[in-house]
Image (tube, rainbow, N blue to C red):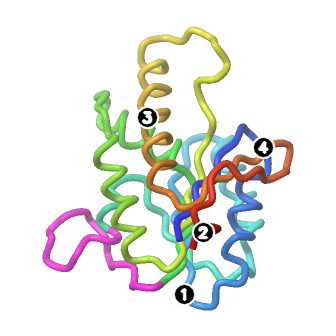
Amino acid sequence: MMTLVTGGAKCGKSHYAERLLEKFAGKKYYIATMEPYGEEAMAAIARHRKLRAGKGFETIERYTDIDGLAAPKGAGEGTAEFRLPRGCGILLECTANLCANEMFKDGLICDPTEKILRGFRRLKDISAELVIVTNEVGSDGLSYEEGTAEYIRVLGTINRLTAQMADRVVECVYGIPVVRKDLSILR
Protein backbone atom coordinates (compact mmCIF):
# COMPACT_ATOMS: atom_id res chain seq x y z
CA MET A 1 0.00 0.00 0.00
CA MET A 2 1.37 3.39 -0.99
CA THR A 3 0.00 6.59 0.52
CA LEU A 4 0.85 10.13 -0.56
CA VAL A 5 0.27 12.75 2.14
CA THR A 6 0.16 16.36 0.94
CA GLY A 7 -0.78 19.77 2.24
CA GLY A 8 0.52 23.22 3.08
CA ALA A 9 3.07 24.22 5.68
CA LYS A 10 2.40 23.24 9.31
CA CYS A 11 -0.86 21.46 8.45
CA GLY A 12 -0.25 18.16 10.27
CA LYS A 13 1.22 16.11 7.39
CA SER A 14 4.06 14.63 9.42
CA HIS A 15 1.91 13.69 12.39
CA TYR A 16 -0.67 12.03 10.15
CA ALA A 17 2.00 10.19 8.12
CA GLU A 18 3.56 8.78 11.27
CA ARG A 19 0.15 7.66 12.53
CA LEU A 20 -0.35 5.65 9.32
CA LEU A 21 2.61 3.46 10.30
CA GLU A 22 1.87 3.44 14.04
CA LYS A 23 0.53 -0.13 14.12
CA PHE A 24 2.86 -1.53 11.46
CA ALA A 25 4.34 -4.67 13.05
CA GLY A 26 7.48 -5.04 10.92
CA LYS A 27 10.68 -3.05 10.62
CA LYS A 28 9.96 0.67 10.05
CA TYR A 29 12.26 3.15 8.35
CA TYR A 30 12.04 6.93 8.27
CA ILE A 31 13.87 8.36 5.26
CA ALA A 32 14.73 11.96 6.16
CA THR A 33 15.55 14.12 3.13
CA MET A 34 16.07 17.57 4.69
CA GLU A 35 19.70 18.61 4.48
CA PRO A 36 20.76 20.41 7.64
CA TYR A 37 21.44 23.90 6.26
CA GLY A 38 20.96 26.80 8.64
CA GLU A 39 19.19 27.29 11.94
CA GLU A 40 15.66 26.91 10.55
CA ALA A 41 16.47 23.53 9.00
CA MET A 42 18.21 22.36 12.16
CA ALA A 43 15.18 23.38 14.24
CA ALA A 44 12.81 21.51 11.89
CA ILE A 45 15.00 18.40 11.99
CA ALA A 46 15.14 18.50 15.80
CA ARG A 47 11.35 18.93 16.00
CA HIS A 48 10.76 15.94 13.69
CA ARG A 49 13.22 13.75 15.60
CA LYS A 50 11.42 14.59 18.85
CA LEU A 51 8.00 13.86 17.28
CA ARG A 52 9.02 10.39 16.10
CA ALA A 53 11.02 9.41 19.20
CA GLY A 54 9.82 6.12 20.64
CA LYS A 55 7.72 5.24 17.57
CA GLY A 56 9.99 2.44 16.39
CA PHE A 57 11.47 4.09 13.31
CA GLU A 58 15.03 3.57 12.20
CA THR A 59 16.06 6.89 10.63
CA ILE A 60 18.00 7.03 7.39
CA GLU A 61 19.36 10.47 6.47
CA ARG A 62 19.22 10.38 2.67
CA TYR A 63 19.24 13.67 0.78
CA THR A 64 19.55 12.33 -2.78
CA ASP A 65 19.64 9.02 -4.67
CA ILE A 66 16.81 7.30 -2.79
CA ASP A 67 16.59 4.76 -5.60
CA GLY A 68 19.82 3.24 -4.28
CA LEU A 69 18.08 2.25 -1.03
CA ALA A 70 15.85 -0.16 -2.92
CA ALA A 71 17.92 -0.99 -6.00
CA PRO A 72 18.13 -4.68 -6.85
CA LYS A 73 21.41 -6.29 -5.79
CA GLY A 74 24.02 -5.88 -8.46
CA ALA A 75 22.24 -2.91 -10.05
CA GLY A 76 25.22 -0.72 -9.26
CA GLU A 77 23.01 2.32 -8.64
CA GLY A 78 23.01 4.68 -5.72
CA THR A 79 25.40 4.92 -2.84
CA ALA A 80 23.44 3.06 -0.18
CA GLU A 81 25.42 1.56 2.64
CA PHE A 82 22.68 -1.05 2.78
CA ARG A 83 19.47 -1.99 1.01
CA LEU A 84 16.07 -1.73 2.67
CA PRO A 85 14.56 -5.16 3.40
CA ARG A 86 11.46 -6.48 1.64
CA GLY A 87 8.19 -6.15 3.52
CA CYS A 88 9.25 -3.18 5.63
CA GLY A 89 7.32 -0.01 6.40
CA ILE A 90 8.75 3.22 4.98
CA LEU A 91 7.97 6.87 5.66
CA LEU A 92 9.74 9.30 3.32
CA GLU A 93 9.74 12.93 4.47
CA CYS A 94 9.63 14.78 2.15
CA THR A 95 9.43 14.96 -1.62
CA ALA A 96 9.87 18.75 -1.67
CA ASN A 97 13.27 18.53 0.03
CA LEU A 98 14.33 15.56 -2.09
CA CYS A 99 13.35 17.43 -5.27
CA ALA A 100 15.31 20.56 -4.26
CA ASN A 101 18.35 18.51 -3.25
CA GLU A 102 18.40 16.65 -6.57
CA MET A 103 17.45 19.62 -8.72
CA PHE A 104 20.05 22.10 -7.44
CA LYS A 105 22.86 19.66 -6.60
CA ASP A 106 26.33 20.78 -7.70
CA GLY A 107 25.05 24.28 -8.54
CA LEU A 108 23.31 23.06 -11.67
CA ILE A 109 19.57 23.01 -12.31
CA CYS A 110 18.35 19.67 -13.62
CA ASP A 111 14.99 17.90 -13.81
CA PRO A 112 15.07 14.97 -11.35
CA THR A 113 11.51 13.79 -12.07
CA GLU A 114 12.34 10.36 -13.52
CA LYS A 115 15.09 9.68 -10.98
CA ILE A 116 12.78 10.43 -8.04
CA LEU A 117 9.85 8.47 -9.51
CA ARG A 118 12.15 5.48 -10.17
CA GLY A 119 13.09 5.63 -6.48
CA PHE A 120 9.44 5.79 -5.43
CA ARG A 121 8.58 2.80 -7.66
CA ARG A 122 11.41 0.79 -6.12
CA LEU A 123 10.40 1.72 -2.58
CA LYS A 124 6.80 0.75 -3.37
CA ASP A 125 7.93 -2.60 -4.81
CA ILE A 126 9.92 -3.64 -1.73
CA SER A 127 7.76 -2.23 1.07
CA ALA A 128 4.60 -3.57 2.65
CA GLU A 129 3.59 0.00 3.52
CA LEU A 130 5.01 3.18 1.95
CA VAL A 131 4.04 6.67 3.08
CA ILE A 132 5.43 9.64 1.16
CA VAL A 133 5.01 13.20 2.44
CA THR A 134 5.07 16.17 0.07
CA ASN A 135 4.17 19.85 0.05
CA GLU A 136 1.41 21.54 -1.89
CA VAL A 137 3.07 24.10 -4.16
CA GLY A 138 2.06 26.33 -7.02
CA SER A 139 -1.44 27.20 -5.92
CA ASP A 140 -0.67 30.69 -4.61
CA GLY A 141 -0.80 32.31 -8.06
CA LEU A 142 2.37 34.34 -7.46
CA SER A 143 5.17 34.89 -9.95
CA TYR A 144 8.62 33.70 -8.95
CA GLU A 145 12.16 33.97 -10.24
CA GLU A 146 13.07 31.47 -12.95
CA GLY A 147 14.80 28.88 -10.71
CA THR A 148 11.98 28.89 -8.15
CA ALA A 149 9.31 28.75 -10.86
CA GLU A 150 11.07 25.74 -12.40
CA TYR A 151 11.27 24.03 -8.99
CA ILE A 152 7.52 24.57 -8.46
CA ARG A 153 6.79 23.17 -11.93
CA VAL A 154 9.00 20.09 -11.42
CA LEU A 155 7.68 19.36 -7.91
CA GLY A 156 4.11 19.77 -9.18
CA THR A 157 4.82 17.19 -11.89
CA ILE A 158 6.40 14.78 -9.40
CA ASN A 159 3.43 15.21 -7.03
CA ARG A 160 0.92 14.58 -9.83
CA LEU A 161 2.71 11.43 -11.05
CA THR A 162 3.22 10.18 -7.49
CA ALA A 163 -0.51 10.65 -6.81
CA GLN A 164 -1.28 8.55 -9.89
CA MET A 165 1.05 5.80 -8.60
CA ALA A 166 -0.33 5.88 -5.04
CA ASP A 167 -3.12 3.68 -3.72
CA ARG A 168 -4.25 6.47 -1.42
CA VAL A 169 -3.81 10.27 -1.48
CA VAL A 170 -4.58 12.32 1.61
CA GLU A 171 -4.49 16.10 1.89
CA CYS A 172 -4.05 17.52 5.38
CA VAL A 173 -6.01 20.74 5.90
CA TYR A 174 -5.71 22.44 9.29
CA GLY A 175 -4.75 19.11 10.85
CA ILE A 176 -7.69 17.30 9.27
CA PRO A 177 -6.84 14.48 6.85
CA VAL A 178 -9.04 14.67 3.74
CA VAL A 179 -8.94 11.55 1.55
CA ARG A 180 -8.64 12.48 -2.12
CA LYS A 181 -8.08 8.97 -3.50
CA ASP A 182 -8.43 5.51 -1.93
CA LEU A 183 -8.10 2.43 -4.13
CA SER A 184 -8.09 0.15 -1.06
CA ILE A 185 -11.88 0.47 -0.76
CA LEU A 186 -12.18 -1.19 -4.18
CA ARG A 187 -10.40 -4.37 -2.97
Q: Earlier in the sequence, mark 3 or mark 1?
A: 1
Label 3 to label 1: alpha-carbon separation: 31 Å
**Residue closer to the observer: 186 or 80:** 186
Residue 62 image position (x, y, % from top left): 44, 60
* Residue located beneath label 3 in the image: 157
* Near-viewer residue (117 or 10): 117
Secondary structure state at the residue bearing disc 3: helix
| Residue at figure coordinates x 49%, y 82% from the top left | 88
From the top left corner, tell me how far across and down residue 59 is, in percent: 55, 72
Mark 4–mark 1 Cα distance, whole angstroms, equals 28 Å
Residue identified by numbered label 4: 10
Q: Residues within 10 Å of mark 1 (few under 14, many from 20)?
A: some
The kind of residue tagged 2 is Ser
Look at mark 1 in the image and give the residue it sits on.
27
Q: Which mark is residue 169?
A: none
Judge depth for marks 1 and 2 and give the one in front.
2
- What distance separates the C-alpha of mark 3 from that of mark 2? 24 Å
The segment highlighted magenta reads: 69-87
Q: CA distance from mark 3 to mark 4?
A: 22 Å
Residue displayed at 65% across by 46% down: 6
Image vertical order of residue 47 relative to residue 115, above or below: below
**Measured Cα–Cα span from mark 1 to mark 2:** 22 Å
Residue holding disc 2: 184
For the residue labelled by badge 1, is the local secondary structure a helix, a strand or a loop? loop
Residue under the image location 36 percent in, 42 percent down? 102
In the rendered view, does 107 fall on the left or right side of 184? left
User: Mark 3 or 2, which is nearer the eye?
Assistant: 2
The mark nearer the N terminus, 3 or 4, is 4
Left or right of 92 on screen, residue 142: right
The alpha-carbon separation of the residues under discs 2 and 4 comes to 27 Å
